[in-house]
Image: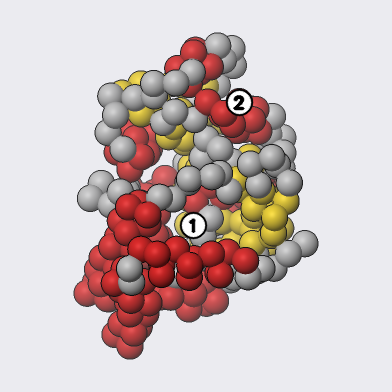
Amino acid sequence: MSAPAVSVVMAVYNGEPWLGEALASILGQSLIDLEFIVVDDGSTDGTPKRLAAIGDTRVSVLRQSRGGQTAALNRGLRAARAPLIARIDADDVALPERLARQAAFLADHPDVGLLGTAAREIAPSGGVVQTLVPPADDRALRRALIRANPFIHSAVMFRRAVIDLVGGYDESFAVAQDYDLWLRMSRVTQLANLTEPMVLRRLAPGRLSSARDSTRLRDEIIAKVRALRSGASPVWSAVFVARPLGALLLPTLLRRAARAVIARTPREVR
């Protein structure tokens, strides 16, 4: 079999409530030359039944016992056959032109190996909360990457050659595995974002528990320190380790209050 133009990788664990919408959004893309690799990470709800009912031959379902999202994503990457790989989460939605727009951009910009897009954040009901428009060009993205993650995980597309070069996701990261990967990718390729929203990112209730938030902060600190040691980030950017470190040291109640204030502060809304 010839390789498709794009491989889309999803890892899902108990994602039944919005899984159907996420699946339909990929299978309904204007770019039809794709394979969709879904790794079921030991789901115990109706996810396996819903996946078994898919009749589209472009979908491959890989089932495994619970191993965590990072390991599931790496399994999906190993199975991917296309030169371009895109991500989508089980509770998010890709707009119909997303894959075609990203593939066309990468064809026109061979030096770019990691491409994201803007995204609309939506409530569980589907209503738009705000639009996230991250930096677009390589220089601006590198400045932002030192400080925080400027890519939306569900919106990225990257080249197979680049992911092979850096070795995929680091499975020691439970939460900030994407941020660590972008930092490592930034050493070997140029970066870009499309400024038009191509993904709906769902703000599901309970998406980030207090314990998981602590893990995210620890992983972010480790990723930044590794980037400093490897030369992916300049030495002066060590100052940006202070923010996640300070948040991690805050008592849980204070951290929740700070997150609530940030959540109420609109970014760019359209």
Viewed as shown, does residue 169 lie left or right of 266? left
SS type, badge 2: helix
Q: Nearer the viewer, mark 2 or mark 1?
A: 2
The reply to whether dot 2 and dot 1 touch (C-beta < 8 Å) is no
What residue does disc 2 label? 20
Say which quadrant the C terminus sits in. Answer: bottom right
Amino acid type, callout 2: Gly
Rendered position, 203 above or below 17? below
**Residue 260: image x %, image y %?**
53, 64
**Residue 127: image x %, image y %?**
73, 46
Q: Is residue 116 visible?
A: yes
Foreground: 205 or 244? 205
**Residue 160: image x %, image y %?**
42, 45
Looking at the image, which residue sits at the far right? 270
The residue shown at (37%, 77%) is: 243
Using the rendered view, name the quadrant where residue 236 is placed: bottom left
Rendered position, 80 above or below 161? above
**Residue 112: image x %, image y %?**
51, 61
First in residue order: circle 2 vs circle 1: 2
The residue shown at (57%, 28%) is: 17
Q: Is residue 142 visible?
A: no
Foreground: 162 or 91? 91
Using the rendered view, name the quadrant where residue 250 is placed: bottom left
Label 2 to label 1: alpha-carbon separation? 27 Å
What residue does disc 1 label? 114
